[in-house]
Image: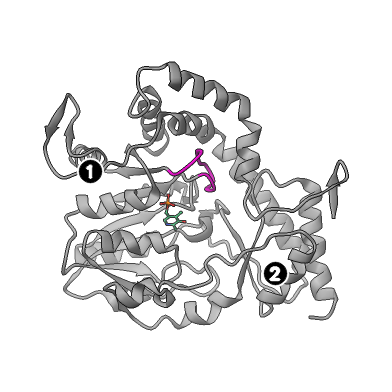
Amino acid sequence: MRFESGKPDVIPAEGHHRRLASMREVIHGFLDGVIDGATTVMGPHTRRLEALLYERWGRRAVATSSGTESLHFSLRAAGIGPGDEVIVPDMTFAATAFAVNAVGATPVFVDVEPGCWLISPEAIRNAVTTRTKVIIVVHLYGQIAEMDEISAIAAEHGLTVVEDCAQAHEATYQGEPAGSFGDFGCFSVWAGKNAGGLGDGGMVVVKDEETLVAVERLRNLGRDPDDRYVHHSWGSRARLSELDAAVLCHQIPMLPVWNERRRLTADRYDKAFADLPLTTPVVLPGREHAFYKYAVHTEHTTALATHLAERGIQAERVYPRLLSQQPAFADLPHRAAPTPVAEANNPKLLCLPIYPELRDEERHAIIAGVRSFFDGGA
Ligand SMILES: *Cc1c(COP(=O)(O)O)cnc(C)c1O
């Protein structure tokens, strides 16, 4: 397949190299600024980023080194430790559960809802024990989970709610953005997320000043902000680089336009696949989806992926194993309730490229690729 200048091109599963390339000059400028500036971490760009998040989310924010550390610090700031149970959906990225192991607590894997693949409120209810302390809600693929019901369960049992918003930058639920419902909102700004820097990065948004100070200390060796060799408590070393902070300050204002472009592509796919024997993503009422991923549900995942790969289109299974099926959790402490919905359906999900940098002709090629698979009589 040829898209431009006679060069056979692959349509990659993720678009962040294109995104970074489109801001090459700007990034070079930021790099020069950091080289010539006073500090490479925790400087003006990080402060500007945290202020920008406060402006947009109405909550105070702490920039960190990753989404994983953001989740870890939230659990630590909430005082979670050995003997405590943390409810986690079985269908998510492993980092969500590793953050629980990092504080010595036990993740409890629960099932998801059919169709949207988001954590099931009913499964949460059934998993609550006297040891349960936290629900980690994952806004999988960019759609916000059933927050009203989950918040009600949390209130009933006195549980902390941590939102894993790694995939849901500026997704909304009843008009409010991901990260504004729970006690903590944790974001990944790894390069491949809807907004992302050059490497790893994360952010935590919190509800009050006391938690803000706790998370700031966890990020930086428990250090006193005004007296660098005074350490008030244990802390990790998990700061965001000034270069990445600058890149993110540049990107975050573009999120609404980028997400709109993702939704437009989703809409085109929905319409183009309406008559095919596959199910397109369900957008639940009251939601604005951020479409980090566009997952189709089909009986023919492997054959479809191969068919697309032959046409230079990278379609991915995200994530091919449930947490309960990961080798790591054969050895790590966890408690798994049966997750029949996740187990039956996870093998049938396949993610098509949907990033904003996807060119129109590439979108057409993806649509043609999917249609030709089914027209071929699969
Ligand atoms: C990316 C991601 C994380 C981890 O973020 P990192 O920045 O890679 O550490 C956690 N949870 C989910 C759902 C993710 O997609």
Q: Quadrant of ligand 1?
A: bottom left
Q: Would you identify the image quadrant in which residue 316 lies?
A: bottom right
Q: Which mark is residue 305?
A: 2
| Marks 1 and 2 close (CB-CB < 8 Å) | no
Position of residue 191 measured from the top left corner of the image (x, y, whole percent): 52, 44
For image coordinates 58% across by 54% down, the residue present is 291
Work out whether residue 54 or residue 38 is closer to the camera in this orientation and state it: 38
Q: Is residue 32 above or below residue 223?
A: above
On the image, numbered disc 1 is attached to which residue?
A: 218
Chief secondary structure of the magenta span? loop
Q: Residues within 10 Å of mark 2 (few under 14, many from 20)?
A: many
Position of residue 110 measured from the top left corner of the image (x, y, whole percent): 37, 74
- For marks 1 and 2, the one nearer the N-term is 1
Q: Which mark is residue 167?
A: none
Q: Which residues are magenta?
A: 191-200
Position of residue 24 measured from the top left corner of the image (x, y, whole percent): 62, 29
